[in-house]
Amino acid sequence: MKPVTVATIAEMKRAEEKIACLTAYDFCFAALLDRTGVDLVMVGDSLGMVMQGHASTLPVSVAHMVYHSSCVARGITRALLVADLPFMSYQQSAEQALANAGRMMQKGGAHVVKLEGGEVMAPTVRFLVDRGIPVCGHIGLTPQSVHQLGGYRVQGRGDDAAQRLTTDARALQDAGASLLVLEAIPSTLAGDITRALKIPTIGIGAGVDCDGQVLVLQDMLGVYPHASPKFAKNFMSGQASVEDAVRAYIAAVKAQRFPGPEHSYT
């Protein structure tokens, strides 16, 4: 099968074909996701919680991300690899972001780098894109800003907050982002943003109308020892193997059976 590229996922949006994404942090799970047909593999800074046992993503370093991304890169031949820029690795300046994005691609094997933040980050996105770095934006609940947000709370409720997120989404698209993660926002708002954008949206707790879906692998398998968020679903339940669970997840995303209303916010 041909490798998935940013052009592939753009065409999937135009064709209204849902995009299936899961996180991975090591070679073995990356290879499993790749052979099951996941379109995007995301090396999230969520590894700080599910791999390292921290209470947030904030302790994750660029070195951690490069290490885990390089492990994942060796396990995939088809999927698009999106890797996070961790906390304080891109906020200081566009030049800082470029240096660390370069490390993620050169040493970590990433195809796309992801950064959090809305309109304020648009100049940095443009700076990276103009220099050949594909970028995935991330708005809504941005885990690196958990303390500023007052916890892991739904974002975008109310007219002013919804307009702010819509403005953020357009600014990131106009800056050249190739795709956009929408996390923990009302499903109606996520659908409106998705229809307004030309670039694909990947939802996590943002309803079924996004162009694609992502879950943290450990949440999808039901192995994270702490409480999972409302938007997660244990696909391992009733399955004989991890591979069967992943295939069930992909099928549910493609058929728009996941997320259901019980995994979404109003």
Image (cartoon, helix red, strand yellow):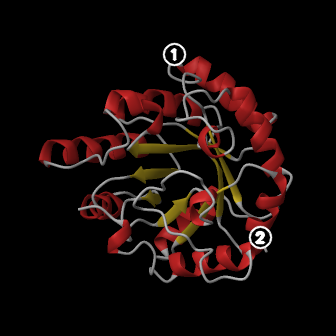
Question: Which residue is identified by label 1?
Answer: 92
Q: Tell me which numbered mark, 2 or 1, is placed earlier along the sequence.
A: 2
The front one of 1 and 147 is 147
Answer with the quarter of the image where residue 119 lies: top left
Which residue is most to the front?
225
Placement of the N terminus among the 4 image quadrants: bottom right
Answer with the quarter of the image where residue 264 lies: bottom left
Mark 1: few/some/many CA within 10 Å (<14, 14-19, 20+)? few
Up-down relation of residue 31 to residue 73 (above or below): below
Residue 246 x, y percent position in the rendering: 66, 73
Residue 200 x, y percent position in the rendering: 47, 60
Mark 2: few/some/many CA within 10 Å (<14, 14-19, 20+)? few
Answer with the quarter of the image where residue 234 lies: bottom right
Q: The residue under label 1 is which amino acid type?
A: Gln
Which label number is shown at residue 79? Answer: none
133 with respect to 166 (left or right): right
Query: Closer to the camera: disc 2 or disc 1?
Result: 1
Question: Which residue is identified by label 2?
Answer: 2
Placement of the C terminus among the 4 image quadrants: bottom left
Q: The residue under label 2 is which amino acid type?
A: Lys
User: How many numbered discs?
Assistant: 2
Residue at position x 60%, y 33% in the image: 85
The front one of 125 and 20 is 20
Residue 232 x, y percent position in the rendering: 48, 63
Question: What element does badge 1 sit on?
Answer: loop
CB under 8 Å between callouts 2 and 1?
A: no
Residue at position x 77%, y 65% in the image: 78
